[in-house]
Image: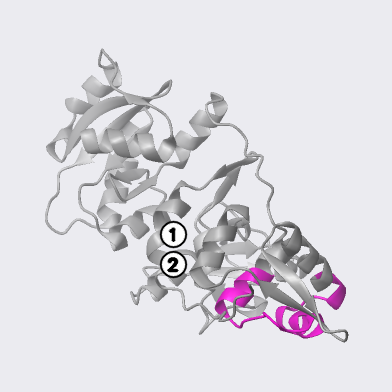
């Protein structure tokens, strides 16, 4: 209990407490058939009451079974519900995220978008005033970090690599300089870009200014194979961890979606799709989106509020998988 309390307080930045009296919902849960596999207790996060269903660890627990139990409890009860998982299994955690199951593994990961919405509605969370980099600047940085070092390269050549005009690259460089990320070097003939940091150190410096590449997500029965798709989301993360994906999610650019007049639906259909603000194929390898963009896709924005909890929990392990392409540092 103490580990959960300290973990939620550190992650959410709000105080967790225990209600003095048990609600009718908690009593109902404790006396239900679900109590054979779960211990139930109630917590308060600021002014929001939450019932925690602590799963007793049986043999062979998996994401599909947990998701089924979670849905049944959600249908049976009316409270805000989260599963507490005592087993730290990365595959299990990714499965639960894919199935949109609220859960916490104390000390490791929190996935609870419903709580986030509740805190927004009660004005417990404030809008972030942090200025973000433009998507075009983000593309240049991610390309530089993962595909090819752009340091010391003329602007025109950079434009050819990342698919933007030379004028747009000039504007991107100006933006990077304003953020203190890089500087311009001129030899009288060409202007080149030099970064002040490199690799993981550079990413750690800029990640607070980066955003999710995802514009929209949903499902479709349309064949997306001709829209230049790559695998994204948990499909790409599983691949990065050398695991067999449980299912496939495809990412396509907003331009391709518009040209194909693609419409997405909330309900399950043949294909699970994300529409990206930039082309996920630009930095893809072997049909999978680049791992930093996939990591950033875990950042969610709801009504102008940025939700980075899942991103922050995944960040450390994902960054260890990145093969940093940039090799030069400017002094």
**In the rendered image of this protein, does residue 143 appear above or below residue 208?**
below
Residue 70 falls left or right of residue 163: left
Which type of secondary structure does the marked residue at label 1 adopt?
Answer: helix
* Residue 227 in view (yes/no): yes
Q: Which mark is residue 315?
A: 1
Q: Quadrant of residue 142?
A: bottom right
Report the coloring of the rendering. one colour
The prevailing secondary structure element of the residues shown in magenta is helix
Q: CA distance from mark 1 to mark 2?
A: 6 Å
How many C-alpha atoms fall within 10 Å of the one at disc 1: few (<14), some, or many (≥20)? some
Q: Quadrant of residue 207?
A: bottom right
Residue stretch in magenta: 140-168
Q: Quadrant of residue 224?
A: bottom right
Residue 8 drawn at (x, y percent): 35, 37
- Residue at the disc numbered 2: 319
Q: Quadrant of the C terminus?
A: bottom right
Q: In the image shown, does 245 or 152 lie closer to the viewer?
A: 152
Residue 321 drawn at (x, y percent): 41, 73
The residue sitting at 35% across, 49% down in the picture is 109
**In the rendered image of this protein, does residue 247 appear above or below residue 10?**
below
Residue 1 drawn at (x, y percent): 21, 33
Residue 223 falls left or right of residue 182: left
The residue sitting at 72% across, 71% down in the picture is 256
How many C-alpha atoms fall within 10 Å of the one at disc 2: few (<14), some, or many (≥20)? some
């Amino acid at each position: 209990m103490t580990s959960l309390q300290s973990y939620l307080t550190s992650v959410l930045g709000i105080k967790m407490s225990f209600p003095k009296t048990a609600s009718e919902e908690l009593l109902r849960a404790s006396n239900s058939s679900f109590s054979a596999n779960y211990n139930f207790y109630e917590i308060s996060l600021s002014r929001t009451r939450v019932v925690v269903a602590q799963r007793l660890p049986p043999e062979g627990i998996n994401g599909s079974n947990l998701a089924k139990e979670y849905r049944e409890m959600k249908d049976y009860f009316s409270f805000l519900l989260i599963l507490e998982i005592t087993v730290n299994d990365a595959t299990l955690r990714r499965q639960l995220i894919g199935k949109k199951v609220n859960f916490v593994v104390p000390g490791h990961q929190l996935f609870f978008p419903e709580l986030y919405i509740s805190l927004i509605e009660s004005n417990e969370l404030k809008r972030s005033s942090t200025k973000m980099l433009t998507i075009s600047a983000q593309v240049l940085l991610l390309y530089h970090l993962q595909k090819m070092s752009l340091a010391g390269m003329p602007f025109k050549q950079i434009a050819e690599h990342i698919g933007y005009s030379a004028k747009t690259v000039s504007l991107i460089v100006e933006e990077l300089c304003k953020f203190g990320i890089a500087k311009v070097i001129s030899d009288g003939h060409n202007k080149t870009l030099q970064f002040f940091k490199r690799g993981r150190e550079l990413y750690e410096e800029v990640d607070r200014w980066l955003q999710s590449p995802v514009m929209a997500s949903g499902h479709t029965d349309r064949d997306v194979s001709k829209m230049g798709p790559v695998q994204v989301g948990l499909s790409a993360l599983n691949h990065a961890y050398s695991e067999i994906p449980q299912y496939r999610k495809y990412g396509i650019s907003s331009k391709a979606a518009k040209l194909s007049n693609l419409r997405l639906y909330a309900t399950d259909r043949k294909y699970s799709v994300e529409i990206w603000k930039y082309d996920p194929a630009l930095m893809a390898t072997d049909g999978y989106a680049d791992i930093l963009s996939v990591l950033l896709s875990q950042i969610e924005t709801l009504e102008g509020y940025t939700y980075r909890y899942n991103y922050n929990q995944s960040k450390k392990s994902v960054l260890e998988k990145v093969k940093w392409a940039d090799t030069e540092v400017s002094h």
